């Protein structure tokens, strides 16, 4: 689960991580009022969308010469004019895809006098099953490019869960960033705060890009200028307060609806809708569709208990995508028996008035009874014997209908 930058910074501040002061705003008036509460004279007006690369992004409505989604403002009038240009418009960045994302919220923050920018992230390293701290002097840039062009500039420090974060981890980060003296101490404080936040929120990723050395009144300060925080969705039941930070307008509506039915659905670009039980089988189903020359329209795992209600909801969600020209149901009747599943499929297909070809592959307990139910349903359901057969049949059906 992702959250906005302003939410991430409010959260990190609670863990003692230094961020510039800022206030979120939903309208031009709120943006100006927010700026008035900040010391000034330099402000930054930041588009709040769940995507990075905002600074270099472009607003669809404003043309290629307009400024991006993160802008400096040197007075209140500029805050106002930036807010007017950003709110309601569509920001396209390298992470949004060409359709972009509508900016409905801004974050008005103190402008910092930046001397140097770094990259610092905490994430779960699947290879070592540990939390890894990734630090680089190449901040403010696309870290994938740094990893590609100059991998030696990326330092990875792995934390042993048995000991937790130790002072030497913080010192290693400071060294990797070339910091000494008071700034090195500040780096250690930042790392300790981020690590505590990571554990305390069951985070999946905390990415600070940039972490910046800024000129402060009392010497140089290390500040978090951008923060991306993602939580482990499976742990949200332990964090009711964090779950409230979810912004559904940032998520695909079909995916939101699917999550209400406890269906794991991810929209893809193809034309064959898939309904499968089990994530591994769903992946294999998508692969074999591709192997047969067409593309899956979605990933959908209905889970172990594929009830009629769930199957109906799944059909409805799949059919909302106008690109879907056929559906492949691939269900293994292990927890649920195949005849029960077949009943559910027939009832659901009738309820949604299914208008695209449907191929069903059932396997498992009571498979013959299940196939009989499909055959006697009076619906044009095509039965398949195995995964290869199913994929070939749905591809043929879709091409026939085209
Ligand atoms: P994104 O990564 O989405 O482009 P950032 O928040 O990283 O957005 O902003 C882009 C750039 O804008 C940063 O690399 C930094 O140089 C500058 N910037 C961001 N916040 C501030 C700030 N509070 N003061 C001064 N400059 C900032
Ligand atoms: Mg950034």
Image (tube, rainbow, N blue to C red):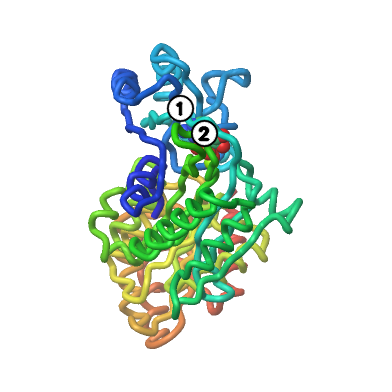
Frontmost residue, 226 versus 282: 226
Residue closest to the eye, 172 or 97: 172
Mark-to-mark CA distance, 2 and 1? 16 Å
Question: Disc 2 or disc 1, which is closer to the eye?
Answer: 2
Which quarter of the rendered picture does the N terminus lie within? bottom left
Q: Earlier in the sequence, mark 2 or mark 1?
A: 1
| Residue highlighted by disc 2 | 215
The residue sitting at 50% across, 53% down in the picture is: 187
**Residue 179 versus residue 49 in the image, above or below:** below
Q: Is residue 197 left or right of residue 148?
A: left
Disc 2 Cβ-to-ligand 1 distance below 8 Å: no
Residue furthest to the right: 149
User: Residue lying farthest left?
Assistant: 240
The residue beneath circle 1 is 44
Q: Quadrant of residue 238?
A: bottom left
**Image quadrant in which you'd find residue 234:** bottom left
Could you tell me if residue 232 is visible in this image? no
In the rendered image, residue 41, in percent from the top left (x then y), is placed at 42, 19
Position of 258 relative to 301 (above/below): above
Residue behind label 1 places its C-beta within 8 angstroms of ligand 1: yes
Give the residue drawn at x 45%, y 69%: 165
> Which residue reaches farthest bottom?
365
């Amino acid at each position: 689960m992702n959250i906005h930058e302003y939410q991430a910074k409010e959260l990190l501040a609670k863990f003692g991580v230094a961020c510039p002061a800022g206030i979120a705003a939903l309208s031009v008036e709120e943006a100006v009022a927010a700026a008035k509460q900040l010391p000034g004279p330099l402000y930054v007006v930041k588009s709040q969308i769940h995507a990075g690369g905002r600074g270099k992004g472009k607003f669809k409505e404003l043309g290629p010469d307009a400024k991006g989604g993160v802008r400096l403002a040197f007075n209140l009038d500029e805050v106002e004019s930036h807010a007017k240009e950003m709110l309601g418009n569509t920001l396209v960045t390298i992470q949004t895809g060409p359709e972009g994302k509508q900016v409905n919220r801004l974050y008005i923050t103190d402008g910092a006098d930046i001397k140097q920018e770094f990259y610092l992230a905490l994430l779960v390293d699947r290879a070592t099953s540990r939390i890894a701290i990734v630090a680089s002097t190449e901040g403010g840039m696309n870290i994938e490019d740094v990893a590609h062009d100059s991998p030696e500039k990326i330092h990875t420090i792995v934390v042993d869960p048995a000991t937790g974060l130790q002072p030497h981890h913080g010192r290693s980060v400071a060294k990797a960033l070339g910091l000494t003296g008071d700034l090195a101490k500040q780096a250690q404080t930042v790392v300790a705060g981020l690590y505590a936040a990571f554990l305390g929120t069951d985070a999946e990723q905390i990415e600070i890009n940039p972490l910046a050395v800024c000129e402060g009144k009392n010497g140089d300060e290390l500040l978090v200028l951008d923060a991306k925080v993602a939580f482990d969705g499976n742990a949200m039941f332990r964090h009711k307060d964090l779950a409230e930070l979810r912004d559904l307008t940032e998520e695909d509506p079909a995916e939101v609806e699917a999550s209400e039915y406890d269906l794991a659905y991810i929209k893809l670009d193809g034309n064959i809708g898939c309904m499968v039980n089990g994530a591994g089988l769903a992946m294999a189903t998508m692969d074999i569709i591709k192997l047969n020359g067409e593309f899956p329209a979605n990933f959908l795992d209905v889970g172990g208990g594929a009830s009629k209600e769930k199957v109906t909801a799944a059909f409805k969600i799949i059919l909302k995508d106008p690109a879907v020209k056929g559906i492949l149901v691939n269900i293994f009747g292990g927890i649920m028996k195949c005849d029960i599943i077949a009943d559910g499929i027939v009832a659901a297909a009738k309820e949604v008035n299914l208008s695209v070809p449907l191929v069903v592959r059932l396997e498992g307990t009571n498979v013959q009874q299940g196939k009989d139910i499909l055959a006697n349903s009076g619906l044009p359901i095509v039965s398949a014997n195995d995964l290869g057969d199913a994929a070939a049949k749905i591809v043929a059906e879709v091409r026939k209908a085209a």
